[in-house]
Amino acid sequence: MVNNGLDISLEQFKRMKSTDRDILIYNNLVHIRKRIGDTRFHRKIHYAWLFVLTVALGLRRFLPI
């Protein structure tokens, strides 16, 4: 197994800052995408993220959250 810096323990993950966590999660997703060979994986992540934001903002607009 290649040590690419993406495998860390749960304790290390909990101690990280939120931006560092986001970067680590994104790098893991990119690593998985390259391993699978799915060239449209990045676009799927964007569509899922836009869907979540749309739902969250829609709920926030129509419900007093």
Image: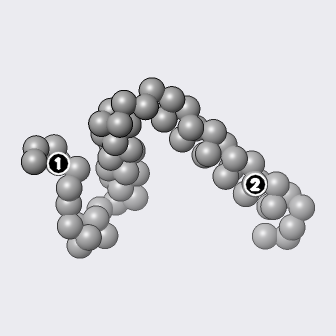
Q: What amino acid type should be assigned to the residue bearing mark 2? A: Val
Q: Residues within 10 Å of mark 2 (few under 14, many from 20)?
A: few
Give how far apart the Cα atoms at labels 2 and 1 are. Answer: 34 Å
Q: Mark 2 points at which residue?
A: 55
Question: Percent from the top left, x then y, of residue 30?
Answer: 36, 38
Residue 46: x and y in percent read 58, 38
Q: Name the residue under label 1.
A: 5
Q: Quadrant of residue 59?
A: bottom right
Q: In this view, does 39 lie to the left or right of 6?
A: right
What residue type is disc 1 on?
A: Gly
Q: Which of 34 and 18 is in front in this view?
A: 34
Instruction: Say what secondary structure mark 2 lies in.
Output: helix
Which residue corresponds to the image point at 20% horizontal and 60% vertical from the top-left?
8
**Left or right: 28, with 44 as reference point:** left
Is tag 2's residue or tag 1's residue first in the polypeptide sequence?
1
Q: Do the residues labelled 2 and 1 touch (CB within 8 Å)?
A: no
Left or right side of 61 for 14: left
Q: Is 31 placed above or below 20 here?
A: above
In the rendered view, how is the structure colored? one colour
**Residue 4: image location, x then y, percent:** 16, 43
Quadrant containing the C terminus in the rendered view: bottom right
Total label count? 2
In the image, residue 2 lies at what x, y percent?
Answer: 10, 44
Residue at 85% x, 58% y: name it: 61
Whether residue 30 is visible, yes or no, is no
Q: Is residue 18 visible?
A: yes
Image mark for residue 19: none
